Image (cartoon, helix red, strand yellow):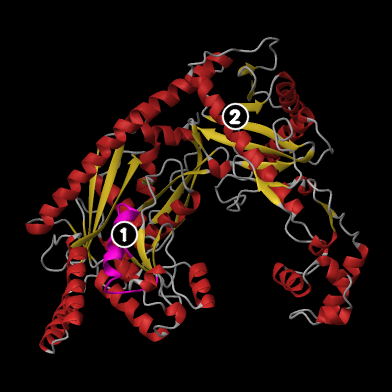
Amino acid sequence: MADPSSYRPKPGQIPDSPGVYRFRDEHRRVIYVGKAKSLRQRLANYFQDLASLHPRTRTMVTTAASVEWTVVSTEVEALQLEYSWIKEYDPRFNVKYRDDKSYPYLAVTMNEEFPRVQVMRGHKKKGVRYFGPYGHAWAIRDTVDLLLRVFPVRTCSAGVFKNAARTGRPCLLGYIGKCSAPCVGRISTEEHGELAEEFCDFMAGRTGTYLRRLEKRMTEAAEEMEYERAARLRDDIGALKKAMEKNAVVLADATDADLIAVAEDELEAAVQIFHVRGGRVRGQRGWVTDKVEDVTTGALVEHALQQLYGEETGDAVPKEVLVPALPEPVEPVQEWLTGRRGANVSLRIPQRGDKKALMETVQRNAQQALALHKTKRASDLTTRSRALEEIADALDLDSAPLRIECYDISHLQGDDVVASMVVFEDGLQRKSEYRRFQIKGFAGQDDVRSMHEVITRRFRRYLADKERTGEWVEDSETDPDTAPADGFKDDDGRPRKFAYPPQLVVVDGGRPQVAAAKRALDELGIDDIAVCGLAKRLEEVWLPEDDDPVVLPRTSEGLYLLQRIRDEAHRFAITYQRTKRAKRFRSSPLDDVPGLGETRKQALIKHFGSVKKLRSATIEQIQEVPGIGRKTAETIAVALAQAAPAAPAVNTATGEIMDDREDEAPETTADASGEPVPAGAPDDRRGQER
């Protein structure tokens, strides 16, 4: 625990101007980001007597080891920079709303030649029109099913579309009139685009004009005694009205607005958002967050606005945002929203009428969401805390191990030997910090030596990272497989490859594996990290210095947590091992040709049919492949001539030699888990693969 006075800036060193500040821990990881109208006044609040601080603020300042700041010219710039840094660093102590689901949207892919209507989740894509979010995907499908009668827009996937175009036969929706079948030319590109635009207009709330137009056409058809067409139009109007009834009118003046409500207690807060478009509720979502410091309702609203509109532009930001409390000051936030929309945005508290009544409904939803979350989490928190305390007691640790790392070795009969490292923090998975290793120090099957190598490599990098400020000292030791997927950098505050040490290392195995892990730590001079092993056979916990294992009760929450961690490490390791094995089976002599990318490799195989035929081709014949020049053709010919031809494939059931199958995908079957298994592999892989 750090003393805040040890890193407190000197008097007069902090500027009295707007800016954004960052607190870092002893490992240089950013743990908190904040903004201030006056950095000097704001930061002074953190260096008061610890007893006067909010409990979580006190935890933050004692966890931190340094503070730094960046001066900006305006409060709007500070707001934008704060949002960018929170998104980039994911600070541990910042208010971050936990979205309990990925809300589905109704999306229309207007960026395609023939726009498609579909359900989409996740990040929004350019050129796609979104409507929602909806609470459930089935609600979108019900709405689309009604509207396709009137707007028969394409809903099929690219594969189905191409297959229909190839065969000249539309899918079932094309036959029953719920798709205009552009795949077979029943409608032109322009006509289908106009149909998609009408669909989007209707979903955007511009319904009155279209309904009146349909009613007029129905009347004209009846007057002309075209009763079948009039009946179809009547049914179309009924379908549209039924779709509109799913979203009742809540604001009579066809308002476009988002309503945000907050329910909170001393520790947590729940936020609910209703999206109203054209006077109708078009979507709803909610988040929950921990209150890390003594934050006001206005500040919670500000953070919600950042998360809600930080990636949005244009009409995705409504003209009106109704909130229970205004951020302080409100002008920079309102100016920021206006900049995101490109037009004026009204940010205010509803005082009377329909909008106030609807805000009360949103508020009730927020209160129910908070109550439900606390009911669920109470059990989870209690169980996780008890599990960590039981582990600490059983292993005689000074405190509960808040960060646990588990390692496992996986191979198939000594081939493709790999290892995994999984991380649990506060009893929960931390998947962003999972790592995987290739065993490089030796060949063959030796789990003990493999465990020693992995632990040595992981903690050697931790020590090197602790001592240096630039790139890795031992570049030769850098393993690209262990790099984080999002490319963490060194001095930007995010954890580097192995910058954050655990309190407990768990290895999958018994006494030999534990001894190897402990020996690796001792050789590196690390004596403040506990080590244990969990043996599969009897679920015994082994400690380095003990001759007998620790046996936890079968009903122990601590044992259950260790089992979960061990099983997750095994899953992660075996998944990586299978990926490497599958890649090895798919390898080709063309992989070793310098400068030959995947596209041209596929073109070569498509042209010649196999590597065997390509190997016997002349340079002039290779040049006939589009994109292959003479120099490249010569390089390919030389590389294939030097490469030894692969051994012929053998059908293990019949003994038949299949010479001319070179470079084709190996025959596979599937195991019980659905993983592909090469033909001829042992049927029972227990004891073969681990």
Q: Amino acid at mark 1?
A: Ile
Q: Secondary structure at mark 2?
A: helix
Residue under numbered circle 1: 140
Name the side, left or right, on which 440 lies relative to 114: right
Picture layout, residue 576 above or below residue 375? below
Name the side, left or right, on which 472 lies relative to 505: right
Q: Are marks 2 and 1 in contact (CB under 8 Å)?
A: no
Q: Is residue 267 visible?
A: no
Q: Residues within 10 Å of mark 2 (few under 14, many from 20)?
A: many
Name the side, left or right, on which 72 lies relative to 321: right
Does residue 667 belong to the magenta stretch? no
Q: Quadrant of residue 441?
A: top right
Does residue 149 belong to the magenta stretch? yes
Q: Identify which residue is drawn at 26% across, 56% down.
A: 329
Residue under numbered circle 2: 566
Residue 674 position, x and y percent, is 60, 44
In terms of depth relative to the viewer, which is nearer, 136 or 10?
A: 136
Point out which mark residue 405 bears.
none
Q: Which residues are magenta?
A: 131-154
